[in-house]
Image (cartoon, rainbow, N blue to C red):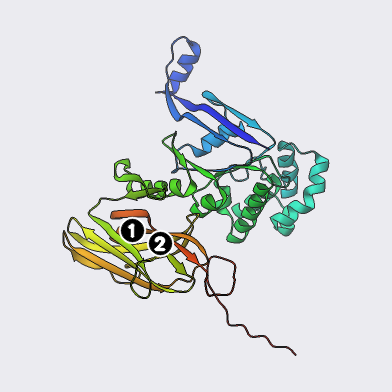
Amino acid sequence: MGAIVVTGLGKAYKQYPTRWSRLAEWMMPGRPRHKLKWVLRDVGFSVKPGEAVGLIGINGAGKSTLLKLITGTTQPTTGTVYMEGRVAALLELGMGFHPDFTGRQNVYMAGQLLGMTVEEITSLMPEIEAFAEIGDYMDQPVRVYSSGMQMRVAFSVATARRPDILIVDEALSVGDAYFQHKSFDRIRRYRQQGTTLLLVSHDKQAIQSVCDRALLLDGGRLTKEGAPEEIMDYYNALIAERENATVRLQATETGKVQTVSGTGEATVADIALLDEHGERVEVVDVGAPVTLQVTVRTSAAIPRMVLGYMIKDRLGQPMYGTNTHLKELPLEDVAAGEEVVYRFAFPMNLGPGSYSVATAIVSTETHLVNNYEWRDLALVFTVVNMRRPYFEGSAWLDPAVDIQRT
């Protein structure tokens, strides 16, 4: 079982005003001629054995530097890192691969860097080749590989043995959809067997489906940690606004933390799920006809208003989403103080479980132009199966079955 403990971690680089300043400082060490540029400062967290933690943040937040400090490829300016157990890290794509050596030769080198013996690598080679699925390219120089092929080989060798701690950076994002599914299946299987996971990704579904907890890194500091859905919602709101002052966190009646962002010029005054008789419901049968009713109230004149909604499962993964821009039904010239009632009617073809609805009031198909309000967990409801045959999954896709015997 592996554990990670990071305490007061910081990394600073020296900045010299001229190229001669470095030489002058070296010649006269008593007088520093540099300034410190802090990339990370006072970062502290722990990952318990068997836990999966996601690390998110915009580009330049310090994620890659933090992983290099944790894995020991860069030395910290302040603080300490303690790790217990065998570590496998997949950081920069193909890191340590020599372009003139074949994939097979690089597997031997990378495997030994991970602590494996030549005999172990030889015994694991058939499995590594089978998982990478690059065929004859395994005996070709790495310089002729695509980035996706490099990632396949790197991931295959790094996870050939189940590590106590697995650290994965954004490298998986360059792979094709098939290999991403295959890789995450292996990660999930190792997790079930007790591997501790630290995952850096901008993929909301990956973080929310794999991780128990998420950390938000912003400006080189750890600014927030909590449930993956909560942190990803907050992160997306920050991207939309780029201004902390307009992002608000509030607790719902169920105790979940709701993220609300936007200018507030339009807001959701009421939201409800209605049954076929127009009654408000919180529990819906699989396949039953329902209407999502959203009442929007404006406090300022809005030239163009679009309402969108997203239905998410209990892990925060999107089930379905649309908006009135995509439906070619935007409202033009909405006056201040106006109230608009939207009704979206559809069959509840979702599998049994708990779901939430997020709403967005914008001016186009995206919240990045005019974000009047973005509200997560605007509505929570439950789907139960009372009349349908038992089925697995998150969608009711009942087939018509035709069987012929000859």
User: Identity of the amino acid at label 1?
Assistant: Ala
Q: In this figure, which residue is indicated by the disc labeled 2?
A: 310
* Tags 1 and 2 touching, CB below 8 Å: yes
Residue name at image x 18 percent, y 62 percent: 338
Relative placement, left or right, of 63 versus 269 is: right
Instruction: Identify the residue shown where x is 49% and y is 27%.
Output: 10
Instruction: Say which residue label 1 marks.
Output: 360
Question: Distance of mark 1 from mark 2, alpha carbons?
Answer: 9 Å
Residue 249's spot in the image, x, y percent?
35, 44
Q: Residue at x 71, y 45 (%)?
A: 162
Label 2 environment density (alpha carbons within 10 Å; few <14, some 14–19, many ≥20): some
Q: Is residue 63 left or right of residue 270?
A: right
Name the foreground residue: 138 vs 294: 294
Instruction: Using the image, determine if residue 164 lies above or below residue 239.
Output: above
Residue drawn at x 58%, y 33% is 70
Residue 360 vs 58, above or below: the answer is below
Which of 378/169 is in front?
A: 378
Number of numbered discs? 2
Question: Is residue 139 visible from the viewing direction of this image?
Answer: no
